[in-house]
Amino acid sequence: MKIVVKVGTSTLAHATGRLNIRRVEELVKVLADLKNAGHRIILVTSGAIGMGVGKLNLPGRPADMPTKQAAAAVGQCELMYTYDQLFSQYGHTVAQILLTAQDVQFPERRHNFENVMGRLLELGALPVINENDAVSTDEVGVSTTIGENDTLSAIVAGCVGADLLVILSDIDGLYTADPRKDESAALIPVVEAITPEVEALAGGTGSALGSGGMATKLKAARLVMEQGCDMVIANGRDPDVLYDIAAGRAVGTRFVGRKDA
């Protein structure tokens, strides 16, 4: 399968913003193994700003745009250095692609992106994708920025014709209520349509270092489901769940893509 895996800041980093080395090493090992098994893997990674916060010893996620840009520029270096070093241990070559909204909104630029992605996969490389937060300076929702990586991962899945999008987060999936506040909340294993009732289940943003929440994940699900691609939300604390997800086993919440797409 052609699988896009999106990993959030809460999975990659400790609350301090520093890299969660053990978890990232486990993630890379599993992705490398899935690639060895014949799957084509694309990694959409958050974490640049969070990593920069830690490396620059900032007190928390910046509120002002110049400091966000600076943190992203510093953190992206650390992210890619780490991925390159770890994937190289398993014999895989990574390729960095930093996108802005214009790269997928304008047909010619989107075509260029699709071409390079296709060629990278043909050459056996593992693309590592993030939004270019050092220059994408508009606020979320403005047409010139993508805003967060849940949506970015759905866009990437559409551009490459992915079979599956996996979003690894700090929650096990979509619940009937917020499990952090309601002990009676139950995990919803399968969603076949994004109805108003499903949308109503989305809460606020996620961790202090990240920018996405359940609402952005449902937006991503809607995008990929319309293209016939399944999407799974699962907890990234144990990257081994990717084996079960790739095998089609019940993990987290699976959003079923339209099979007539």
Image (spheres, rainbow, N blue to C red):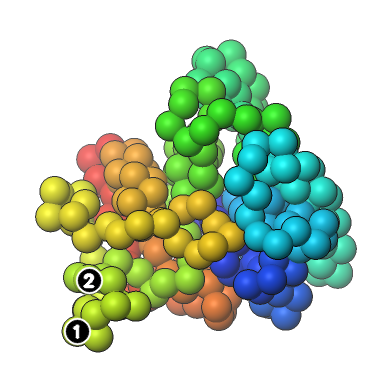
Report the residue at 59% width, 60% height from top: 209
- Where residue 229 sits: x, y (%)? 37, 48
* Cα distance in 3D space between marks 2 and 1: 8 Å
Whether residue 77 is visible: yes
**Mark 1 or mark 2, which is nearer the start of the sequence?**
2
Helix, strand, or loop for circle 1? loop
Foreground residue among 142 and 80: 142
Please give left or right for residue 43 compared with residue 190 in the image: right
Label ID, residue 11: none
Q: Residues within 10 Å of mark 2 (few under 14, many from 20)?
A: some
Residue placed under numbered mark 2 in the picture: 177
Helix, strand, or loop for circle 2? loop
Report the residue at 65% width, 67% height from top: 12
Please give left or right for residue 48 compared with residue 161 in the image: right
- Where residue 32 sits: x, y (%)? 70, 67
Do residues under tags 2 and 1 come within 8 Å of each other at their CB atoms? yes
Foreground residue among 150 and 243: 150
- Where residue 19 sits: x, y (%)? 74, 69
Residue 135 drawn above or below residue 75: above
Please give left or right for residue 51 compared with residue 176 in the image: right
Foreground residue among 74 and 63: 63
- Where residue 100 sits: x, y (%)? 61, 29
Question: In the image, what residue type sits under mark 2?
Answer: Ala
Q: Say which quarter of the image contains residue 9.
A: bottom right
Residue 108 drawn above or below residue 174: above
Of the 4 image quadrants, the one containing the C terminus is: top left
Whether residue 133 is visible: no
Residue placed under numbered mark 1 in the picture: 184
Please give left or right for residue 90 compared with residue 207 in the image: right
* Number of callouts: 2
Report the residue at 34% width, 78% height from top: 180
Report the residue at 77% width, 42% height from top: 70
